[in-house]
Amino acid sequence: MNNDPNNPSVNLSQLDEDFRTAEPDSAGGDFESVPDGSYQAVIEKVELRNSSKGNPMLTLMLRILGPRHANRVLWRNIVFTQNSVKYAKADLCTCGLALANLSELRSRLTDLLDVKLEITKKTKGDNENI
């Protein structure tokens, strides 16, 4: 997979006519937030990166299976610090991923794909927790 932002193999011209005739979405494509509650979801994408504070972080893209809010996406960030590692380990175990060492995670990321979970979304103030 080529992640080059200037990748010449990306063909945008096939949508030129649709683009010319499309009315801009004045709403900006905003969706209402998924309401708080429990949902059946599947892990569709995983990414290991650094948080804004520079800590290692695992990002999970969770697609809701339904029946309510089917195909909507929620994101779960698992940040690894000395204080949070026990919670992160519990999250990984919930996903069926048992590791002897956290350093094994990079080579086991694909084991998280397609894992089905029951998730709960809770909102407190401006913060959403999955």
Image: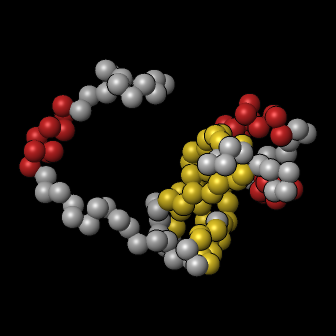
Q: Is residue 78 left or right of residue 69?
A: right
Q: Nearer the viewer, residue 96 or 55?
A: 55
Residue 91 lies in what quarter of the image?
bottom right
Percent across and percent down for residue 73 are 50, 59
* Point 35% across, 65% down: residue: 30
Compared with 36, 88 (above or below) is above
Q: Residue furthest front?
A: 53
Compared with 19, 67 (above or below) is below
Q: How many marks?
A: 0
* Point 14% across, 37% down: residue: 16
Q: Quadrant of the C terminus?
A: bottom right
Compared with 87, 55 (above or below) is above
Q: Is residue 70 left or right of residue 62?
A: left
Percent across and percent down for residue 93 are 82, 53
* Point 39% across, 29% down: residue: 5
Residue 7 lies in what quarter of the image?
top left
Q: Nearer the viewer, residue 25 or 64?
A: 25
Q: Residue furthest right?
A: 100
